[in-house]
Amino acid sequence: MAEVGIIMGSQSDLDKMKKAREALEAFGIDSEMIVASAHRTPERVRQWALGAEERGVRVIIAGAGMAAHLAGVVASLTVLPVIGVPCSGGALGGVDALYATVNMPKGTPVATVAIDGAYNAGLLAVQILAASNPDLREKLKAFREKQAAEIARQSEGIR
């Protein structure tokens, strides 16, 4: 059963959004993935979001570029936490997607990561799940310790 649902607005976002799945898999978390557009397939988005909780999804990651309304639309349809990933592309290189994702009205929050920050979205989903899972919290602590040790190792090489 997938604990994290990953939705993207276009197949062209797949290479970017796969990084969220990579982060989740590193912690043993199953995910489901779907392509559905807030503008071109709104009913598909609606049905997927409305059924997410029943399917066992506990956190949603939504990635889209340009107008990037996907995360907000999904957040309006569920009480599950939604993490938005603004995807690069188009004339503005993802800045338009960032603004569209981060500027949510009061009452409909979307946590937003950097442009093309799907890996961090996956890590944020892990942190959300770890709030109620001590084993996952320990894995996160070990991950952070490993990161710190790697930075210390890199520092040794440049003295």
Image (spheres, rainbow, N blue to C red):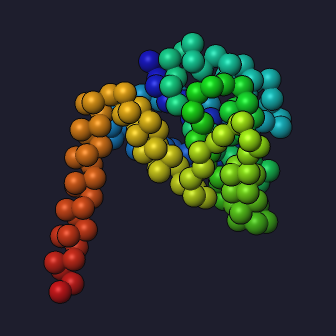
Q: Is residue 14 visible?
A: no
Q: Residue at x 56, y 53 (%)?
A: 113
Q: Residue at x 46, y 44 (%)?
A: 124
- Towards the viewer: 123 or 32: 123
Question: To which quarter of the image does residue 25 belong?
Answer: top left
Tell me which corner region of the image, top left, top right, bottom left or bottom right, holds residue 130: top left
Q: Position of residue 50 (x, y in %)?
A: 68, 19
Q: Residue at x 38, y 33 (%)?
A: 131
Residue at the top extreme?
Answer: 54
- Give the vertical position of 159 relative to 119 (above or below): below
* Camera-nearest residue between 56 and 91: 56
Q: Dividing the image into 4 quarters, which one contains the N terminus?
A: top left
Q: Is residue 56 left or right of residue 62?
A: left
Q: Position of residue 155 (x, y in %)?
A: 21, 77
Query: Where 114 sits versus 151, above or below?
Result: above
Q: Residue at 33% of width from left, 41% of height from top?
A: 26
